[in-house]
Image (tube, coloured by chain):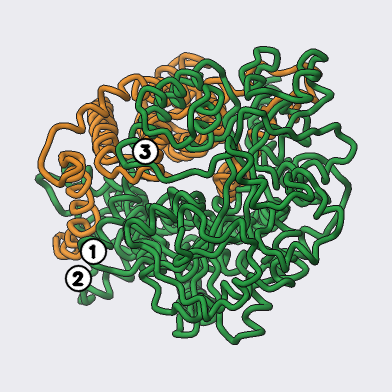
Amino acid sequence: MKSKKPLVPYLFWMAAFVIIPLGMVIYYAFTGKDGRFSFSNFRYIAENSQVYLDSFLIALISTAICLLIAYPLALVMMRMSPRGQRMMNILVMLPMWMNFILRICSLEVIFRSGGVLDQILGFSNPVNHTMAAVVIGIVYNYLPFMVLPLYTVMSKISKSVLEAGRDLGCNGWRLLWKVIFPLSIPGVISGITMVFVPAASAFVIGNRLGGFYLIGDTIDSYYTKSFDLNAASMLSFVLMVVIVISIVVMNHFDKDDDIVLV
Amino acid sequence: MKKTASYLYLGLIFLFLYAPILLMIALSFNDARHGISVWQGFTLENYASLLKNEELMDALINSLVIALLSAVGACLLGTLGALGLNNVKKGRGVLMNFSNLPIINPEIVTGVSLMLLFIAVFGMKLGFFTVLLSHVVFNTPYVILNVMPRLRRMDKNLFEAALDLGCPPAKAFFKVVLPEIFPGVFAGFLISLTYSFDDFIISYFTGGNFQTLSVFVNNSMKKGIQPWMASMTGVIFVAVLMILLIMNIHDARAEAIEKNKISAPTPKKGMGYVKAAAAVLCIALILGICLPRVLRSDDNTIVVCNWGEYMSTGDCDFDVIAEFEKATGINVEYVTAESNEALYAKMKSGSGKYDVIFPSEYMAERMIDEGMLAKLDYDNIPNYESIMDAFKGMEHDPKEEYTVPYFWGTVGILYNADMLTEKDLAMMENPKDWSILWSKNYPNQIMMFDNPRDAFGIALKQLGYSQNTTDETEIREAAALLKEQKFYYGMDQFFEMIPSGSLAIAPYYAGDCMYVMEDNPDMDLRFVIPECGTNIFSDAMCVPATSRKQAQAEAFINFMLTAEAGKANTEYVYYSTPNQAVFDVLEPEMQENKVAYPQGTEDLKAFRERMTSWEAFQYLPVKINDLMTDLWNEIKTNNK
């Protein structure tokens, strides 16, 4: 049980499929069109600085909304019977089995002018093709990633701790704030990570629901429209660095170095 | 009161989560071909046709096999990794961070870098195994993240105790450690399955010709949400719901047993082995059925890469591929690509190896220039005779060496007359230019091509420049013009949003406009080409230089030129045929349709020579193409 041997095959695996690809991204990021080492690709960062800011802003807002929606949901789930809890878990996970592109197209059908929402409302909805629609799309897509870790952590809070809190005069909001919330922090942190990371690099969602590119779409565009690996790699590299830094910073709020998942 | 509030809350959240799914399932009963978001009547046909769609079934099986195998692989590797990582004291944080990189990285970075790894470093052929490896790569961290907490909470002395009692380490692991961490492994398995099935980006980049369901759906989006996509969603939804419910009931029962007899684990464990054996048997059976399909490849199979919905195949009445296979005995692996640029990128990177492709003229020109196409042996394509003179020896292939025309068409404006103001309506009778697209009267109701070449083409025409200009200032002017309007950028949306009345004005390809007009006879839809000129395009059938089955590929091209296959394709796609033999057998209404055949009774060659403002795209120098992509990204990121 104390042996480190099982790690050996995994280390080889990581070297081959994680480290080398990472190295290749860095290699292309710092190579010019002529194949020589160069910093010339930094111009893409400057040109796209606004896109980075917009993408991170949208990702932050979406993550916050996910947290606001998912936290009460996890609280409600926590109070259900074990059977009910499992049912909830299934229902939260199930939408992910609908194809990603179709999920987004379906939302587009709902929001577009004269679409399902307009017909229900009777007037044209103000969300159509705006930043708000993109945020809704991201929240829709990644909400399960927030709910599941929150629920996992909360379901492990033992009933006796809650009872002790009540006995000591904590009720309602105080119990939530003083007892449940501190214990749920690992779940909050992994939830934020699980939503923020894919949201920041989201692709297709911005283009279809908002009509504009986010950084994920821009990277894709460089690759598919002009086969520009250098530009795509440089933009990806910066995106990756920012995301890794924000995760490391955030994990400092958590004493335990585990990311809690489902 | 509190309870009602929380149920209300649950209800609202699930309404939000399920509205798009329920909408899709409702649409699966809609009797429409393209543009299924507009209700046209009830049918069950969309479900019946699922089974007939061979490409779809292949993609579905591919997806299921990959999901299952990669989840199993990730569980094995992830459990090993977690066991090892758990025993590392120093530097575990760093190792964990590296281990998590595949999920921290944006998917597109993981996808592209893995593709480069397979091609450039390992020299592997992209396909089943590369997709499988890639899925294991991004699934393993999820397994580790699920197993680690269980391992850390486990009492380490248990394992030692088992050893002290004379249990060999391997047995101790299976008897003591595995049952303890199993819930974590299982959760990791379920998550891996879900992610793998849903993944699109990574499979897209690492798949080569191997298409999973997500990739197939994405490449088939060309003409909007297809009926089979909706019915597919319905089937998958119900199937997964059933599986999860059965698992839930099973869990509940197991839990009840555990509650009643805490001290009697022995019979349960015995049952566990039986179940495990049954599960292994099931998996083996599934793999036995699927693997031969997935791994099949023989010398008599050609890979045909077309655009989505650009050939009469799948569940069509006359399946040209099935007919070709029947007539020649050559097998066809049919795959789809998203765009000319994506096709080029796939071929250039070595990730796409095809025998027949359908590039547009400007891309064919570029491929010829870069030596990517094979010279055709026209003796193997006797039906080439019937190609109209107007399409022989065109600018991109003046000596008739590399290409065989497939379809052609023009770009014009389709508008919904009921949505236009009277003044605009009068103006659109005979528009001088494309200025209606910049009107401020129709916010959110004017579409623009969601690809740089077509969008810049229109802007350049509007400014009176050539669509093939290499003058940087002219291109920058066009970019500025595009920025002036907040367009609804879209492609496939055209097929959904014109019928639903969401768009008033949309520039689009003539054949597609004709389709939408015919499919919606109640609407007052009109098609017009501005006087200042437009783009006239043609797509060609070509054989890549990398093909080793040129003769079979040429047989395929020849078959596509037969009157029957050509007619089926023309009636399915609605684009204009460059093939006289096909044109002659079309319905008279089709032959006389001015949208598809604007030349009327005039000789097509003479007509084309007269319409000098109708330009065919030429391929742009790399520098200009890069500039266009830069400007395009700038336009698209600012279109808020």
On-image quarter of the C terminus of chain A:
top left
B171 and A161: which is toward the camera? B171
Chain assignment, label 1 = B
Q: Residue at x 75, y 25 (%)?
A: B430
Labels 1 and 2 within one chain: yes
Q: Residue at x 68, y 28 (%)?
A: A112
Going by the numbered disc 1, the residue's amino acid type is Phe
Q: Is residue B108 visible?
A: yes
Labels 2 and 3 within one chain: yes
Of the numbered discs in the image, which one, if any, rests on residue B189? none
The relative height of residue A253 versus residue B373 in the rendered view (above or below) is: above
Q: Secondary structure at mark 3?
A: helix
Chain assignment, label 2 = B
Q: Dot 3, crowdedness within 10 Å: few (<14), some or many (≥20)?
A: some
Chain letter for the green colouring in the rendering: B
User: Do the residues under discs 1 and 2 have CB atoms within 8 angstroms?
Assistant: yes
Q: Dot 2, crowdedness within 10 Å: few (<14), some or many (≥20)?
A: some
Q: Which residue is mark 1?
A: B159
Q: Which residue is mark 3?
A: B625
User: Do the residues under discs 1 and 3 have CB atoms within 8 angstroms?
Assistant: no
Lateral position of residue B588 relative to residue B178, left or right: right
The relative height of residue B359 versus residue A114 in the rendered view (above or below) is: below
Of the numbered discs in the image, which one, if any, rests on residue B163? 2
Q: What x and y, as percent, mark residue B221?
A: 60, 48
